[in-house]
Image: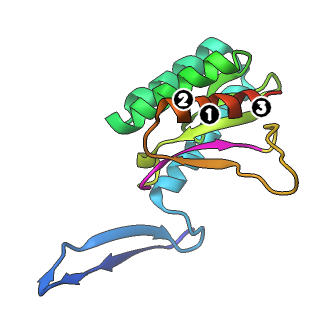
Amino acid sequence: MTTKTAAKKTTTTKGTTAKNTTTDKDTKSGFNADERAAMKERAKELRAEAKGAKNREKGLADLESKIAEMPDDDRALAETIHRIVTENAPDLLPKTWYGMPAYADANGKTICFFKAASKFGARYAELGFNEDAMLDDGTMWPTAYAISALSPAQEKAIATLVTRAVS
């Protein structure tokens, strides 16, 4: 049985008291509600994959559904990332991964994913690459990129990364 505690924070700014906020932290696991929800989504995805749901159409439908649920800013970024990935790595399979849009190789290994800023209340979205992506560059290289907006030059850079990731 897990024990939950709710921590209340009160901040004071120039003589005024801000509204109390409650953060729900599970003291045993250390995960907040958003993190637990992502893990539950991943468990659901794994059960679906075990039942043979590794097909392009199902994965694409799941991915598009997750993108459609996003706030406007995140959705615009996710749609652009989706276009870039499908144009530059058409063999990658669309899917969801921890409830995020992702793309996997023929073995089902997630190569790259998009994490919306709204997913965990971050100030920027991320494009991430997992260890099966072929981005190795010496002994140190980035595996995630913060994104708050995309210009044509940044889209081109992402296309290059995606192409390299699957080479």
| Labels 3, 2: front one | 3
Residue topped by disc 3:
164
The residue at which mark 2 appears reads as: 81
Residue type at mark 2: give it: Ile
**Left or right placement of residue 139 versus residue 85 in this view:** right
Q: Residue at x 50, y 49 (%)?
A: 37
Report whether residue 71 is seen: no
Q: Residue furthest top?
A: 57
The residue at the far front in this view is 153
Name the residue: 77% across, 31% down: 164
Characterize the local packing of mark 2: few (<14), some (14-19) or many (20 or more) Cα atoms within 10 angstroms. many
- The residue type indicated by label 1 comes to Ile
Whether residue 30 sits left or right of residue 165 in the image: it is left
Distance from the alpha carbon under mark 1 to that under mark 3 = 10 Å
Q: Is residue 126 magenta?
A: yes
122 to the left or right of 146: left
Secondary structure type for disc 1: helix
Nearer the N terminus, badge 1 or badge 3? 1
Residue 165 horizontal/vertical position (percent): 76, 33
Asked whether 116 or 108 is in front, the reply is 116
* Residue found at x 83% / y 47%: 137
* Magenta-highlighted residues: 122-130
Q: Amino acid at mark 3?
A: Arg
Q: Mark 1 — residue?
A: 158
Q: Are marks 2 and 1 in contact (CB under 8 Å)?
A: yes
Query: Is mark 1 in CB contact (under 8 Å) with mark 3?
Result: no
Q: Quadrant of the N terminus?
A: bottom right
Q: Nearer the viewer, mark 2 or mark 1?
A: 1
Whether residue 92 appears in magenta in the rendering, the answer is no
Q: CA distance from mark 2 to mark 1?
A: 8 Å
